[in-house]
Amino acid sequence: MTSMRQGRTAALMVGAALLVSTVGDEVAMVALALRGADRTGLTSVVSAQMLAGLVPGIVLGGPIGRVCDRFRTDAVLGVALALECLVAAAAAAVADSALLLITAMLMLGVLGAVAQTCVMALVPQLFPGPGIQLRVNGVMESVRNAGYIVGPLLVGLLTAHGGTGLALVVDAGTFAFALLAIPVIRGRISAPHPAASAPAGAGKRTAGAAGGGLRLGLSLLWAGAGRRMTLTTIAVTVAATSVANVLMPFFARDIPGGTAVYGTLLATWSVGLVLGPFLLRGRLGRLPTSAVAVTAATCIGLSYMVTGAFPVIPLMLAAFLGGGMANAVQNVALRTHVMADCPQDVRGRVGAAYGATLQSAVAAGFALAALVPADGARWGILAGGVIAFLAGLLGRLGLLRTRVTAGPPAPGRPVTVTAGTALDGERP
Protein backbone atom coordinates (compact mmCIF):
# COMPACT_ATOMS: atom_id res chain seq x y z
CA MET A 1 0.00 0.00 0.00
CA THR A 2 2.84 2.35 0.86
CA SER A 3 4.60 1.50 -2.40
CA MET A 4 1.42 2.21 -4.38
CA ARG A 5 0.97 5.54 -2.61
CA GLN A 6 4.61 6.44 -3.28
CA GLY A 7 4.17 5.50 -6.92
CA ARG A 8 1.13 7.76 -7.26
CA THR A 9 2.95 10.60 -5.52
CA ALA A 10 5.93 10.18 -7.83
CA ALA A 11 3.68 10.07 -10.88
CA LEU A 12 1.85 13.21 -9.73
CA MET A 13 5.06 15.11 -9.06
CA VAL A 14 6.68 14.01 -12.31
CA GLY A 15 3.53 15.01 -14.21
CA ALA A 16 3.39 18.42 -12.53
CA ALA A 17 7.09 19.00 -13.14
CA LEU A 18 6.75 17.94 -16.77
CA LEU A 19 3.77 20.25 -17.34
CA VAL A 20 5.50 23.24 -15.76
CA SER A 21 8.84 22.64 -17.48
CA THR A 22 7.11 22.14 -20.85
CA VAL A 23 5.32 25.43 -20.35
CA GLY A 24 8.72 26.89 -19.53
CA ASP A 25 10.26 25.51 -22.73
CA GLU A 26 7.46 27.01 -24.81
CA VAL A 27 7.62 30.33 -23.00
CA ALA A 28 11.37 30.53 -23.56
CA MET A 29 11.15 29.68 -27.25
CA VAL A 30 8.33 32.09 -28.05
CA ALA A 31 9.59 34.91 -25.83
CA LEU A 32 13.13 34.74 -27.21
CA ALA A 33 11.82 34.63 -30.77
CA LEU A 34 9.65 37.68 -30.11
CA ARG A 35 12.59 39.49 -28.54
CA GLY A 36 14.78 38.54 -31.49
CA ALA A 37 12.26 39.95 -33.95
CA ASP A 38 11.81 43.12 -31.86
CA ARG A 39 15.48 43.84 -31.14
CA THR A 40 16.98 42.95 -34.53
CA GLY A 41 14.13 43.06 -37.07
CA LEU A 42 15.86 40.23 -38.96
CA THR A 43 14.16 36.98 -39.96
CA SER A 44 17.59 35.38 -40.22
CA VAL A 45 18.14 35.88 -36.48
CA VAL A 46 14.82 34.28 -35.57
CA SER A 47 15.56 31.41 -37.98
CA ALA A 48 18.97 30.93 -36.36
CA GLN A 49 17.30 30.89 -32.93
CA MET A 50 14.90 28.14 -34.01
CA LEU A 51 17.77 26.07 -35.39
CA ALA A 52 19.79 26.65 -32.22
CA GLY A 53 16.96 25.13 -30.19
CA LEU A 54 16.66 22.09 -32.50
CA VAL A 55 20.24 21.17 -33.42
CA PRO A 56 21.66 20.25 -29.96
CA GLY A 57 19.40 17.21 -29.68
CA ILE A 58 20.87 15.90 -32.93
CA VAL A 59 24.53 16.92 -32.71
CA LEU A 60 25.08 16.35 -28.97
CA GLY A 61 23.15 13.10 -28.62
CA GLY A 62 26.30 11.11 -27.81
CA PRO A 63 27.65 13.28 -24.97
CA ILE A 64 24.16 13.79 -23.54
CA GLY A 65 23.52 10.05 -23.48
CA ARG A 66 26.86 9.31 -21.82
CA VAL A 67 26.24 11.92 -19.11
CA CYS A 68 22.79 10.50 -18.37
CA ASP A 69 24.20 6.97 -18.11
CA ARG A 70 27.31 7.83 -16.11
CA PHE A 71 25.62 9.82 -13.34
CA ARG A 72 22.37 9.45 -11.42
CA THR A 73 19.61 10.39 -13.83
CA ASP A 74 17.62 12.33 -11.25
CA ALA A 75 20.72 14.36 -10.37
CA VAL A 76 21.41 15.18 -14.01
CA LEU A 77 17.78 16.26 -14.46
CA GLY A 78 18.01 18.49 -11.39
CA VAL A 79 21.18 20.18 -12.65
CA ALA A 80 19.63 20.70 -16.10
CA LEU A 81 16.51 22.32 -14.63
CA ALA A 82 18.59 24.55 -12.36
CA LEU A 83 20.75 25.71 -15.27
CA GLU A 84 17.65 26.36 -17.41
CA CYS A 85 16.37 28.57 -14.61
CA LEU A 86 19.64 30.54 -14.54
CA VAL A 87 19.83 30.88 -18.34
CA ALA A 88 16.25 32.14 -18.58
CA ALA A 89 16.86 34.68 -15.81
CA ALA A 90 20.09 35.85 -17.45
CA ALA A 91 18.36 36.12 -20.84
CA ALA A 92 15.69 38.34 -19.30
CA ALA A 93 18.38 40.72 -18.07
CA VAL A 94 21.03 40.84 -20.80
CA ALA A 95 19.96 39.04 -24.00
CA ASP A 96 19.38 41.94 -26.38
CA SER A 97 21.87 41.43 -29.23
CA ALA A 98 21.54 38.79 -31.94
CA LEU A 99 24.55 36.86 -30.59
CA LEU A 100 23.20 36.71 -27.04
CA LEU A 101 19.72 35.76 -28.19
CA ILE A 102 21.02 32.88 -30.31
CA THR A 103 23.37 31.81 -27.51
CA ALA A 104 20.52 31.76 -24.99
CA MET A 105 18.39 29.61 -27.28
CA LEU A 106 21.33 27.30 -27.93
CA MET A 107 21.99 26.81 -24.21
CA LEU A 108 18.31 26.16 -23.53
CA GLY A 109 18.26 23.73 -26.46
CA VAL A 110 21.16 21.76 -24.97
CA LEU A 111 19.65 21.70 -21.49
CA GLY A 112 16.21 20.84 -22.85
CA ALA A 113 17.67 17.88 -24.75
CA VAL A 114 19.36 16.69 -21.53
CA ALA A 115 16.10 17.00 -19.59
CA GLN A 116 14.10 15.11 -22.22
CA THR A 117 16.63 12.29 -22.28
CA CYS A 118 16.55 12.10 -18.48
CA VAL A 119 12.76 11.89 -18.38
CA MET A 120 12.76 9.11 -20.98
CA ALA A 121 15.37 7.15 -19.00
CA LEU A 122 13.64 7.75 -15.65
CA VAL A 123 10.25 6.27 -16.57
CA PRO A 124 11.49 2.62 -16.63
CA GLN A 125 13.30 3.22 -13.32
CA LEU A 126 10.28 4.73 -11.62
CA PHE A 127 7.68 2.40 -13.12
CA PRO A 128 9.01 -1.08 -13.97
CA GLY A 129 6.91 -3.11 -16.40
CA PRO A 130 5.82 -2.29 -19.99
CA GLY A 131 2.11 -2.15 -19.07
CA ILE A 132 2.44 0.60 -16.49
CA GLN A 133 5.08 2.34 -18.63
CA LEU A 134 2.57 2.61 -21.45
CA ARG A 135 0.01 4.19 -19.10
CA VAL A 136 2.55 6.55 -17.55
CA ASN A 137 3.91 7.56 -20.96
CA GLY A 138 0.33 8.24 -22.03
CA VAL A 139 -0.31 10.53 -19.08
CA MET A 140 3.00 12.30 -19.64
CA GLU A 141 2.21 12.80 -23.33
CA SER A 142 -1.12 14.44 -22.51
CA VAL A 143 0.53 16.60 -19.85
CA ARG A 144 3.36 17.62 -22.16
CA ASN A 145 0.97 18.52 -24.96
CA ALA A 146 -1.17 20.55 -22.57
CA GLY A 147 1.99 22.51 -21.83
CA TYR A 148 2.40 23.23 -25.53
CA ILE A 149 -1.05 24.82 -25.50
CA VAL A 150 -0.64 26.78 -22.27
CA GLY A 151 2.88 28.05 -23.01
CA PRO A 152 2.14 30.31 -26.03
CA LEU A 153 -1.04 31.62 -24.39
CA LEU A 154 0.95 32.52 -21.28
CA VAL A 155 3.60 34.28 -23.35
CA GLY A 156 0.95 36.42 -25.03
CA LEU A 157 -0.52 37.42 -21.68
CA LEU A 158 2.82 38.16 -20.02
CA THR A 159 4.28 40.00 -23.00
CA ALA A 160 1.21 42.21 -23.25
CA HIS A 161 1.59 43.31 -19.61
CA GLY A 162 5.35 43.33 -19.05
CA GLY A 163 7.18 42.59 -22.28
CA THR A 164 9.42 39.65 -23.04
CA GLY A 165 11.49 40.40 -19.93
CA LEU A 166 8.58 39.48 -17.66
CA ALA A 167 7.88 36.38 -19.73
CA LEU A 168 11.47 35.18 -19.32
CA VAL A 169 11.46 35.87 -15.56
CA VAL A 170 8.31 33.79 -15.18
CA ASP A 171 9.98 31.19 -17.40
CA ALA A 172 12.87 30.97 -14.93
CA GLY A 173 10.30 30.45 -12.18
CA THR A 174 8.77 27.46 -14.00
CA PHE A 175 12.09 25.64 -14.05
CA ALA A 176 12.64 26.43 -10.38
CA PHE A 177 9.21 24.97 -9.57
CA ALA A 178 9.96 21.82 -11.55
CA LEU A 179 12.98 21.24 -9.29
CA LEU A 180 10.56 20.40 -6.45
CA ALA A 181 9.95 17.02 -8.08
CA ILE A 182 13.58 15.91 -7.82
CA PRO A 183 13.49 14.83 -4.11
CA VAL A 184 10.35 12.79 -4.77
CA ILE A 185 11.92 11.12 -7.80
CA ARG A 186 15.08 10.37 -5.82
CA GLY A 187 13.07 8.76 -3.04
CA ARG A 188 11.13 6.63 -5.51
CA ILE A 189 14.22 5.15 -7.18
CA SER A 190 14.97 2.27 -4.84
CA ALA A 191 17.74 0.57 -6.80
CA PRO A 192 21.18 2.25 -7.02
CA HIS A 193 22.22 3.69 -10.34
CA PRO A 194 24.03 1.07 -12.48
CA ALA A 195 27.03 3.32 -12.97
CA ALA A 196 27.53 3.48 -9.23
CA SER A 197 26.75 -0.13 -8.37
CA ALA A 198 26.40 -2.53 -11.26
CA PRO A 199 24.62 -5.79 -10.45
CA ALA A 200 26.33 -9.10 -10.96
CA GLY A 201 26.15 -10.23 -14.55
CA ALA A 202 25.43 -6.77 -15.87
CA GLY A 203 28.37 -7.10 -18.22
CA LYS A 204 26.55 -9.87 -20.06
CA ARG A 205 23.60 -7.62 -20.73
CA THR A 206 25.47 -4.64 -22.13
CA ALA A 207 28.94 -5.69 -23.11
CA GLY A 208 31.03 -2.65 -23.93
CA ALA A 209 28.36 -0.26 -22.67
CA ALA A 210 30.89 1.75 -20.66
CA GLY A 211 32.22 3.23 -23.91
CA GLY A 212 30.54 4.66 -26.94
CA GLY A 213 28.08 7.48 -27.23
CA LEU A 214 25.55 8.17 -29.94
CA ARG A 215 26.95 5.37 -32.08
CA LEU A 216 26.28 2.80 -29.36
CA GLY A 217 22.84 4.26 -28.72
CA LEU A 218 21.96 4.07 -32.41
CA SER A 219 23.25 0.49 -32.70
CA LEU A 220 20.99 -0.58 -29.82
CA LEU A 221 18.07 1.52 -31.01
CA TRP A 222 18.12 0.09 -34.54
CA ALA A 223 19.03 -3.52 -33.70
CA GLY A 224 16.65 -6.25 -34.86
CA ALA A 225 14.48 -6.52 -37.96
CA GLY A 226 11.25 -5.52 -36.21
CA ARG A 227 12.83 -2.49 -34.55
CA ARG A 228 14.40 -1.36 -37.82
CA MET A 229 11.11 -1.72 -39.67
CA THR A 230 9.25 0.29 -37.03
CA LEU A 231 11.77 3.12 -36.83
CA THR A 232 12.25 3.35 -40.59
CA THR A 233 8.50 3.69 -41.06
CA ILE A 234 8.23 6.36 -38.39
CA ALA A 235 11.23 8.29 -39.76
CA VAL A 236 9.76 8.35 -43.27
CA THR A 237 6.31 9.42 -42.08
CA VAL A 238 7.74 12.11 -39.79
CA ALA A 239 9.83 13.56 -42.63
CA ALA A 240 6.89 13.49 -45.05
CA THR A 241 4.48 15.18 -42.64
CA SER A 242 7.10 17.73 -41.55
CA VAL A 243 7.04 18.96 -45.15
CA ALA A 244 3.33 19.56 -44.69
CA ASN A 245 3.93 21.51 -41.47
CA VAL A 246 6.12 24.00 -43.31
CA LEU A 247 3.65 24.37 -46.18
CA MET A 248 0.55 24.91 -44.04
CA PRO A 249 0.99 28.72 -43.65
CA PHE A 250 1.12 29.06 -47.46
CA PHE A 251 -1.83 26.70 -47.85
CA ALA A 252 -3.79 28.92 -45.45
CA ARG A 253 -3.82 31.69 -48.06
CA ASP A 254 -6.01 29.61 -50.34
CA ILE A 255 -8.54 28.17 -47.88
CA PRO A 256 -11.74 29.88 -46.70
CA GLY A 257 -11.06 31.92 -43.60
CA GLY A 258 -7.32 32.21 -44.23
CA THR A 259 -5.08 32.57 -41.21
CA ALA A 260 -7.96 32.45 -38.75
CA VAL A 261 -8.84 28.93 -39.91
CA TYR A 262 -5.14 28.03 -39.90
CA GLY A 263 -4.91 28.96 -36.22
CA THR A 264 -8.05 26.95 -35.51
CA LEU A 265 -6.56 23.94 -37.27
CA LEU A 266 -3.40 24.15 -35.15
CA ALA A 267 -5.47 24.42 -31.98
CA THR A 268 -7.56 21.42 -33.07
CA TRP A 269 -4.41 19.35 -33.61
CA SER A 270 -3.22 20.36 -30.14
CA VAL A 271 -6.51 19.24 -28.61
CA GLY A 272 -6.04 15.91 -30.36
CA LEU A 273 -2.55 15.66 -28.87
CA VAL A 274 -4.00 15.99 -25.38
CA LEU A 275 -6.86 13.54 -25.96
CA GLY A 276 -4.98 10.92 -27.97
CA PRO A 277 -3.23 9.06 -25.12
CA PHE A 278 -6.59 8.26 -23.52
CA LEU A 279 -7.25 5.89 -26.44
CA LEU A 280 -4.50 3.64 -25.07
CA ARG A 281 -6.49 2.92 -21.93
CA GLY A 282 -8.78 0.56 -23.84
CA ARG A 283 -8.20 -2.32 -26.20
CA LEU A 284 -5.67 -0.34 -28.22
CA GLY A 285 -3.33 -0.29 -25.22
CA ARG A 286 -3.19 -4.11 -25.21
CA LEU A 287 -1.90 -4.37 -28.77
CA PRO A 288 1.82 -4.63 -29.63
CA THR A 289 3.32 -1.17 -29.24
CA SER A 290 5.26 -1.28 -32.53
CA ALA A 291 2.07 -2.07 -34.46
CA VAL A 292 0.21 0.73 -32.67
CA ALA A 293 2.97 3.24 -33.50
CA VAL A 294 3.06 2.32 -37.20
CA THR A 295 -0.74 2.31 -37.50
CA ALA A 296 -0.90 5.73 -35.85
CA ALA A 297 1.70 7.04 -38.31
CA THR A 298 -0.51 5.79 -41.15
CA CYS A 299 -3.44 7.72 -39.68
CA ILE A 300 -1.34 10.90 -39.52
CA GLY A 301 -0.59 10.54 -43.22
CA LEU A 302 -4.29 10.01 -43.89
CA SER A 303 -5.17 13.22 -42.07
CA TYR A 304 -2.88 15.25 -44.35
CA MET A 305 -4.22 13.41 -47.40
CA VAL A 306 -7.76 14.48 -46.49
CA THR A 307 -6.61 18.05 -45.83
CA GLY A 308 -4.86 18.37 -49.19
CA ALA A 309 -7.50 16.55 -51.22
CA PHE A 310 -10.60 18.11 -49.64
CA PRO A 311 -9.87 21.64 -48.30
CA VAL A 312 -13.30 21.98 -46.72
CA ILE A 313 -13.29 23.39 -43.19
CA PRO A 314 -15.37 20.70 -41.42
CA LEU A 315 -13.38 17.89 -43.04
CA MET A 316 -10.07 19.59 -42.28
CA LEU A 317 -11.03 20.11 -38.64
CA ALA A 318 -12.00 16.44 -38.30
CA ALA A 319 -8.79 15.39 -40.04
CA PHE A 320 -6.65 17.56 -37.75
CA LEU A 321 -8.37 16.31 -34.61
CA GLY A 322 -7.80 12.71 -35.70
CA GLY A 323 -4.26 13.49 -36.80
CA GLY A 324 -3.41 15.05 -33.45
CA MET A 325 -4.79 12.07 -31.57
CA ALA A 326 -2.85 9.67 -33.80
CA ASN A 327 0.29 11.78 -33.31
CA ALA A 328 0.04 11.42 -29.54
CA VAL A 329 -0.67 7.67 -29.74
CA GLN A 330 2.35 7.23 -32.01
CA ASN A 331 4.62 9.09 -29.59
CA VAL A 332 3.50 7.09 -26.56
CA ALA A 333 3.60 3.69 -28.27
CA LEU A 334 6.98 4.26 -29.91
CA ARG A 335 8.59 5.61 -26.74
CA THR A 336 7.33 2.62 -24.75
CA HIS A 337 8.43 0.18 -27.45
CA VAL A 338 11.93 1.63 -27.58
CA MET A 339 12.53 1.63 -23.83
CA ALA A 340 10.73 -1.60 -22.84
CA ASP A 341 13.67 -3.91 -23.60
CA CYS A 342 16.44 -1.37 -23.16
CA PRO A 343 19.25 -2.36 -20.73
CA GLN A 344 19.26 -0.06 -17.72
CA ASP A 345 22.83 1.17 -18.03
CA VAL A 346 22.42 2.46 -21.61
CA ARG A 347 19.00 4.07 -21.36
CA GLY A 348 20.47 7.55 -21.61
CA ARG A 349 22.31 6.78 -24.83
CA VAL A 350 19.35 4.98 -26.38
CA GLY A 351 17.06 7.86 -25.35
CA ALA A 352 19.45 10.39 -26.89
CA ALA A 353 19.67 8.30 -30.08
CA TYR A 354 15.88 8.14 -30.21
CA GLY A 355 15.58 11.92 -29.93
CA ALA A 356 18.32 12.49 -32.52
CA THR A 357 16.63 10.10 -34.96
CA LEU A 358 13.25 11.83 -34.79
CA GLN A 359 14.72 15.34 -34.87
CA SER A 360 16.81 14.40 -37.91
CA ALA A 361 13.64 13.23 -39.66
CA VAL A 362 11.95 16.54 -38.81
CA ALA A 363 14.94 18.50 -40.09
CA ALA A 364 14.94 16.47 -43.33
CA GLY A 365 11.28 17.29 -43.84
CA PHE A 366 11.88 20.98 -43.23
CA ALA A 367 14.69 20.95 -45.79
CA LEU A 368 12.63 19.10 -48.42
CA ALA A 369 9.80 21.61 -48.00
CA ALA A 370 12.07 24.29 -49.47
CA LEU A 371 11.82 22.49 -52.83
CA VAL A 372 8.05 23.02 -53.03
CA PRO A 373 6.90 26.35 -54.55
CA ALA A 374 4.57 28.44 -52.41
CA ASP A 375 1.72 28.19 -54.93
CA GLY A 376 1.99 24.40 -54.82
CA ALA A 377 1.54 24.13 -51.05
CA ARG A 378 -1.73 22.19 -51.30
CA TRP A 379 -0.23 19.57 -53.56
CA GLY A 380 2.88 19.35 -51.41
CA ILE A 381 0.70 18.64 -48.36
CA LEU A 382 -1.25 16.04 -50.32
CA ALA A 383 1.96 14.39 -51.54
CA GLY A 384 3.41 14.33 -48.02
CA GLY A 385 0.23 12.74 -46.72
CA VAL A 386 0.22 10.11 -49.47
CA ILE A 387 3.87 9.22 -48.83
CA ALA A 388 3.28 8.92 -45.08
CA PHE A 389 0.12 6.86 -45.59
CA LEU A 390 1.79 4.43 -47.98
CA ALA A 391 4.90 4.18 -45.80
CA GLY A 392 2.69 3.31 -42.83
CA LEU A 393 0.87 0.59 -44.77
CA LEU A 394 4.13 -0.92 -46.00
CA GLY A 395 5.58 -0.75 -42.50
CA ARG A 396 2.59 -2.58 -41.06
CA LEU A 397 2.92 -5.32 -43.68
CA GLY A 398 6.66 -5.51 -42.96
CA LEU A 399 6.01 -5.96 -39.24
CA LEU A 400 3.54 -8.77 -39.92
CA ARG A 401 6.07 -10.50 -42.17
CA THR A 402 8.81 -10.07 -39.56
CA ARG A 403 6.69 -11.65 -36.84
CA VAL A 404 5.73 -14.58 -39.09
CA THR A 405 9.37 -15.15 -40.07
CA ALA A 406 10.69 -14.91 -36.50
CA GLY A 407 7.99 -17.12 -34.99
CA PRO A 408 7.15 -17.27 -31.28
CA PRO A 409 10.00 -17.50 -28.74
CA ALA A 410 10.76 -20.90 -27.29
CA PRO A 411 8.99 -21.45 -23.95
CA GLY A 412 11.23 -20.88 -20.99
CA ARG A 413 14.19 -19.88 -23.09
CA PRO A 414 16.13 -17.02 -21.47
CA VAL A 415 16.90 -13.98 -23.59
CA THR A 416 19.89 -11.73 -23.01
CA VAL A 417 20.76 -8.35 -24.42
CA THR A 418 24.25 -7.33 -25.49
CA ALA A 419 25.64 -4.10 -26.84
CA GLY A 420 25.10 -5.32 -30.39
CA THR A 421 21.53 -6.57 -30.07
CA ALA A 422 18.17 -5.51 -28.77
CA LEU A 423 14.96 -7.44 -28.36
CA ASP A 424 12.37 -7.25 -31.10
CA GLY A 425 9.73 -8.55 -28.72
CA GLU A 426 6.60 -6.44 -28.71
CA ARG A 427 5.10 -5.73 -25.34
CA PRO A 428 1.39 -5.12 -24.85
Image (cartoon, rainbow, N blue to C red):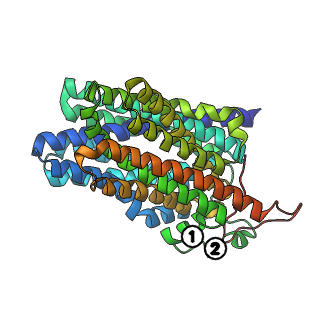
- Quadrant where the N terminus is found in the figure: top right
User: In the rendering, at what x and y percent does residue 277 appear?
Assistant: 58, 35
User: In the rendering, at what x and y percent does residue 258 appear?
Assistant: 26, 28
| Residue type highlighted by circle 2 | Gly
Badge 2 crowding class, 10 Å Cα cut-off, few under 14, some 14 to 19, many 20 or more, is: some
Q: Nearer the viewer, residue 269 or 178?
A: 269
- CB under 8 Å between discs 2 and 1: yes
Q: Is residue 373 above or below residue 164?
A: below
- Which residue in the protein does label 2 denote? 420
User: Would you say residue 150 is visible in this rendering?
Assistant: no
Q: Under tag 1, what secondary structure?
A: helix
Is 336 on the left or on the right of 274, as rendered?
right
Going from N to C along the chain, the mark reached first, 2 or 1, is: 1
The image's mark for residue 114 is none
Q: Residue at x 68, y 66 (%)?
A: 198
User: Would you say residue 301 is visible in this rendering?
Assistant: yes
Q: Nearer the viewer, residue 177 or 126?
A: 126
- Which residue in the protein does label 1 denote? 219
| Residue type highlighted by circle 1 | Ser
Badge 1 crowding class, 10 Å Cα cut-off, few under 14, some 14 to 19, many 20 or more, is: some
Q: Residue at x 49, y 68 (%)?
A: 214
User: In the rendering, at what x and y percent does residue 395 appear?
Assistant: 59, 55
Q: Is residue 315 above or below residue 132?
A: above
- The answer to which image quadrant residue 295 occupies is top right
